[in-house]
Amino acid sequence: MCGDRSTKTGLKLWEQVKGIGKLYYSDYWKSYQQFIPKDKHLQSKSETYTVEGYNSLIRHYLARFKRKGKCYSKQVHMIGKSLNLLMAKLNNQLSILF
């Protein structure tokens, strides 16, 4: 799922994941409260720091994920390929690059 942190994007994501888990963790972004039911929503930085760390690594290594970048393709299949290569490298499964 790609997009900004607006309620509109959040609703699209929610429609795809709402039946998957029992609890949904997020930070304190206001728009999440508009579509995630209170009884299933836990807001806490302590539950989101790991994913934020991965997001930071991805933005560091892949220019296409930097905000407002115009230099690289944003096509979903290219994003997937880029992420797969990065994760392979970070997991020492790829001996080339970086």
Image (spheres, rainbow, N blue to C red):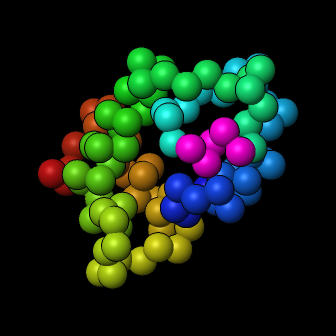
Residue found 42% across the figure and 77% down from its top: 73
Q: Is residue 88 above or below residue 50?
A: below
- Magenta stretch, residue numbers: 30-34
Q: Is residue 77 above or below residue 54?
A: below
**In the image, is 89 to the left or to the right of 24?**
left
User: Please, which residue is most extreme toward the bottom here?
Assistant: 70
Residue 32 lies within the magenta run: yes
Residue found 55% across the figure and 25% down from its top: 43
Horizontal and vertical percent for residue 80? Answer: 51, 58
- The secondary structure that dominates the magenta segment is helix
Horizontal and vertical percent for residue 21? Answer: 75, 25
Residue 91 position by quadrant: top left
Say whether residue 93 is visible: no
Q: Is residue 57 above or below residue 60?
A: above
Q: How many marks?
A: 0
Residue 83 lies within the magenta run: no
Residue nearer the viewer, 8 or 53: 8
Say whether residue 8 is visible: yes
Horizontal and vertical percent for residue 18? Answer: 80, 37
Residue found 29% across the figure and 43% down from its top: 56
Residue found 44% across the figure and 49% down from its top: 84
**In the image, is 61 to the left or to the right of 37?**
left
Horizontal and vertical percent for residue 8? Answer: 68, 62
User: Please, which residue is most extreme toward the right here?
Assistant: 19
User: Please, which residue is most extreme toward the left here?
Assistant: 98
Residue 50 position by quadrant: top left
Residue nearer the viewer, 14 or 37: 37
Quarter of the image where the N terminus is located: bottom right
